[in-house]
Image (cartoon, grey):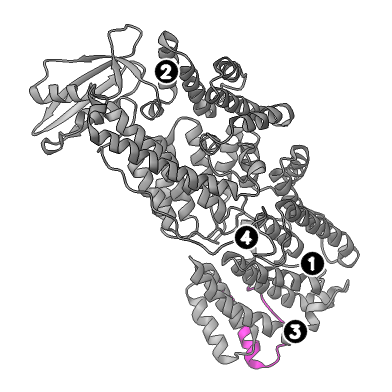
Amino acid sequence: MKIRTNFYVLSYPQRLIIFISLFFFPIQVNAQNSIRQQIDKDRDGSFLEDKTYEKARGFIRKDSTYYVGHLLEGAYLFFRANDELGFRKAIGPLRKALAKIEYDFDPLLRIRTNNYQVYSANYRYQFDYGLITYFLGRCYQNVEQQDKAMEILEHIRDRNFQVEINSDSYNTMAWIFHRNRVYTSKQFKFLKNSVRENVVAANKYLDSALRKIRNDVPVNNGLYDPSFLNRQYLSTYHYKAMIHDYLLDIDSANYYYDLLIQNQAYSSNNYAEFKLAMGEFEEAELFFQEAEQREQSPEKTTKEYYYMRGILAMYSGHPEKADTLLGNVVQQQGSTPGYGWHTIGLARAKHYEGLTAESQEKTNKAARFQELHIGTTWGQEQYNLAVASLNYLNQLQFKKEYWFEHNEWYFWLNPMNWYRWVKYTLEIRHHKMVLASLVAENPEREQVLYSIFSPENLITFDEVWSVIDGFGNEYFIDIYKKRLATDKRPRVKKYFKYFLGKLYLAEGKEAEAIKYFEQVLNDPDLDDPYQTMLIARVYEGLAMVTDGDDQKKYTQQLYVRYPQLIPFSDLTMSFRVHVQGQPTEVEQEIIDELKTSRIDFTEDQNAPLVTIFFTKRGESLDINYSVASGTQGTFRVEPNELSGTGKILAYHLFNVQKQKIGERPKAEPQPKAESKEKPV
C-alpha cells in the first residue's frame, strides 16, 4: 500500500538522510585498543561513497572481531543492492556486525538511565545497534524472509531500549503483519490464519508501541526535548492511518491523517492513496506530485506515485500522458526495484491508447521480471493480478481489433474468419479463467477489489469491472446495492451506480440500466476532469442499451470524451468524409480500404465531418486528417508500407496512433513462484 516511514520525528526519507550523515559523527570514547581507536577515528564518510567498501574491508583486516567494519560493508552493500542477490550479499556482514556488537557491548545495549553522562557515553553503541538491525531487518524483508525480519524486531523489542534509535520494533512488526496479511502461519509462522486476524494483530502491535512510548517518558525526561518525546507518537499514527485507510474506516483514518498533517509528519504518497480511495482524484494527483518532489530516499524502494499517477491519467482521458511519464521512468531506472510495476503501468497506458500489441509486449516484460516489493505493501499477489488483468483485456482487444479492421460484407463467408473467431474466443476464455482463479484465491477480494477504490487495489475501476463481468450478476447487484446504501465515500457512489447499470444491462433489464446510468450523469461531481473515463463508459452503456438516433448521439458523446475506446467496443461510429482534391489511384485505394473498417460513413449532417488530404513527399506520402470534434494529425507512409494504410488511418480517426496492424504478441505466462498458502 504505502512507502514505509521509519524513525520517530521525520518522514522516512528525511530520517534516512540524517542517519547516513550522522552515522559517522565524531566519536570520543575509550576504545578497547589502539586499533579500534584508530578505526573509530577513520570511519567518517558516507555509506554511498565507493571508497566505503574498501575502508570497510581495511577495518576488517585490522580487527575482524570489531563490528564497525562489518557494519560499513553491510550498509554499503545494502544501498548498492538492486535485486535479491544484492540484499542477500548484505545480510552476511550485517549478521556478523550484529553478533559482534552484542558480544562486546551487550551490557551497554541494555542500559536504561536518566543520567545524561551515562546515557551519552553509551549512546553511540545503541545508535550503531539501531543501524545494524535496521539494515538487516530490511534485507530480510526485501528477500521475503519475513520470519527472520520478525526475529530481529523481537530482538530489539526484548532489549527494551528507552529510545529505539534508528529502529522501530513494534511499528515495524505491525507493518510486516499488514504487508503479509493475505498469508497464514503455513507461510510465515508468526502470522495468524486470516486477513482479519492479521490486521487485528497489526493494530495490537501499534497499541503496544504507544504504550511503550508512555512507559518510557519518565526515564527520557530531561534527556530529550519534550517536543521530540511527543513526536514519537507520530510514527505510530502513520501506521494507524494506514490500517484504518485499508479497512475504509474513514473517520479514524481522517483523524490520524489530520494529526500527521498538523505536525508536518505525513507521507504525501500515503495521503494521496487515501484521497484516491475516497474518490477525490484531483487531490490525489496533487499529493502524488508532492510525494515525487519530497522523495529523498537513497534506498531503491518502489515509487508508488509514478504508477498511481499513470492510473489517474487514464481516468482523465489522457493515457498518452501516462505513457510519457512511465516510459521515462522505466528508461531511467533500468532493471531496479519498481521496474516491473512501472512496466505494468506503461502497458496499461498503451492499452488505453489502443496500442494493443505494444501493451502486450510490455505486459510480457512485466511477467518475466522478478519484482522486489521494497518499502511497500504492494505484493506479488497484486502484481500477478495486474498482469493477468492486462493479459485478459489485451486478448479482448485483439479480437475487437480484428473485427474493427474487417467489416467486409463477405466476412463470415471466409472460413479463416471462423477459425480466428474460435481462436480468439478460446484465448479470451483461458485468460478470463486465469483472472477468475486469482480473484477466487484472493482472501481480501471483497475489501480491496469489490470496493472498486482501495489503497490496496492497483487496477483501474475499468479492470475491476472486467474481473467481475460474467460471474453472477445477481450476486454483484446485491453487493453494490448494499454498498450504495452503506458506503461512507460519497464520491465513490457514482461508480457503484455505474456498475449496477452494467450489471442490469448484462441481465437484459434495460430500464434499470438506463436509470443507473442517468443517475451517474446527474452527479454534481462530474466537472472533475478525472471522471472522463467514467463518463465515457456511461455513454457507452447508454449507447448499448439504445438504438437509432439515441445510440448515435451517445456514441458521439463517447467519441468526444475518449475516442480510443470506440474501435474496441461493440459500437459503430458514424462519420461524414471529405477528401480534398482528386485522389490518385494509390490514394483512392487507401480510401477504399478505410471504408472496409467498422465505421459508418454516412451523409447524415449530424455526424462529425472527417477531412482527408494527401501530400507527396518525394516517394513518401503524408496523410493529413482532421475530425470536426478536434482529433487531427498527420502520418507518413513509405511506398513499401502502403498495405494496411487505410486501416491505420481508421484507427487514427479515433486518436489511436498505430503504426502497424496485424501484430499480436502472445501473452507469456508468469514464472511459477513458490506456493504461498492463504486462508480460504
Examine the rendered structure and indicate whether residue 95 appears above or below residue 368: below
> What SS does tag 2 mark?
helix
Q: Amino acid at mark 3?
A: Phe
- Relative placement, left or right, of 117 versus 594 is right
Q: Which residue is mark 4?
A: 677
Q: Which residue is mark 3?
A: 105
- The Cα atoms of the two marked residues, 2 and 1, are separated by 63 Å
Q: Amino acid at mark 1?
A: Val
Examine the rendered structure and indicate whether residue 10 appears above or below residue 50: above
> What SS does tag 3 mark?
helix
> What SS does tag 1 mark?
loop
- The Cα atoms of the two marked residues, 1 and 3, are separated by 17 Å
* Range of magenta residues: 24-46
Give the mark nearest the N terminus, 3 or 4: 3
Q: Nearer the viewer, residue 614 or 383?
A: 383
Q: Residue at x 47, y 42 (%)?
A: 432
- The Cα atoms of the two marked residues, 2 and 3, are separated by 75 Å
Q: Nearer the viewer, residue 47 or 500?
A: 500
Q: Residues within 10 Å of mark 4 (few under 14, many from 20)?
A: some
Q: Which residue is mark 1?
A: 163
Give the mark nearest the N terminus, 4 or 1: 1
